[in-house]
Image: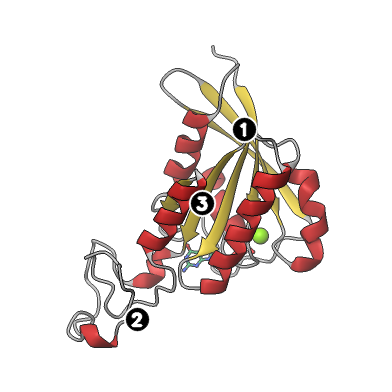
Amino acid sequence: PQKPFQTKLVLLGEAAVGKSSVVLRFVQNDFQENKEPTIGAAFLTQKCRLEDRLIKFEIWDTAGQERFHSLAPMYYRNAQASAVIYDVTKASSFEKAKSWVKELQRQANPNIVIALVGNKIDLLGESSTSDADADADEDDDTATATPEAGAAGDAGSLRAVPKDEAEAYAKEAGLLFFETSAKTGEGVVEVFTEIAKKIPID
Ligand code: GDP
Ligand code: MG
């Protein structure tokens, strides 16, 4: 039996973007509609099996509220990985995510693996499984205009952070990038698996 390789991962992001929900989905494959806000931070562990190794994530799920900001360095200081989460329907949460990335790049371990994660994509109604409202794609003109947004139909969606914009930022900043739904589970396991692949073993 392989000895798991332990990796400390910290979750950061504005309050209510779904940090705790993403972890709950990853660790227990569960979702709660009205999740109570995290106080301080919560600690959870979960193993992740890759082809060639077993990683045990030690996850610090921090509170997003500003009054807890000063505690964050305690959690990211020795972290090998971080998932910085925002809500794809809330532009301010993307700005907050970028400021967390800056802080990590200035203050955390220089080799830290950072994943930028746009959560709550289930709210967009642009999923491939489209049993969605019949009038959703009739009136493109009413959709939020996003100059370089991809061809993927975002008509009628509540998207506030264009995927291309977030992806381009992530690329420029050297981050992994994902969009997820803790509610449906879409993309969640990939976040942790791709992070795990990037963790140096020695
Ligand atoms: P945190 O403060 O970042 O830890 O956010 P929580 O995990 O507590 O989630 C805040 C609220 O958003 C809760 O009511 C969750 O049920 C809800 N939520 C979290 N993730 C999702 C998601 O992917 N989709 C939807 N629709 N709601 C979500
Ligand atoms: Mg929380």
Please tell me which of labels 3 and 1 falls first in the chain: 1
Disc 2 residue lies near ligand 1 with CB under 8 A:
no
Query: Few, some or many C-alpha atoms within 10 Å of disc 3 (few <14, some 14-19, many ≥20)?
Result: many
Rendered view: 194 above or below 3: below
Q: Which residue is mark 2?
A: 144
Please tell me which of labels 3 and 2 falls first in the chain: 3
The answer to whether residue 193 shows anywhere in this view is yes
Please tell me which of labels 2 and 1 falls first in the chain: 1
User: 107 and 45: which one is in front?
Assistant: 107
Please give the name of the residue rendered at 30% of the width and 67% of the height, measured from the top-left corner. Answer: 149
Q: Amino acid at mark 1?
A: Asn
Q: In which quarter of the view is residue 140 placed?
A: bottom left
Q: Secondary structure at mark 1?
A: loop
Please give the name of the residue rendered at 67% of the width and 66% of the height, measured from the top-left corner. Answer: 36
Q: Which residue is mark 1?
A: 111
Q: Amino acid at mark 3?
A: Leu
| Horizontal and vertical percent position of residue 15 | 65, 67
Q: Amino acid at mark 2?
A: Thr
Viewer-side label of 3, 1: 1
The quarter of the picture where the C terminus appears is: top right
Q: In the rendered view, does 156 fall on the left or right side of 2?
A: left
| Horizontal and vertical percent position of residue 115 | 52, 46
Please give the name of the residue rendered at 57% of the width and 66% of the height, measured from the top-left corner. Answer: 95
User: 131 and 110: which one is in front?
Assistant: 110
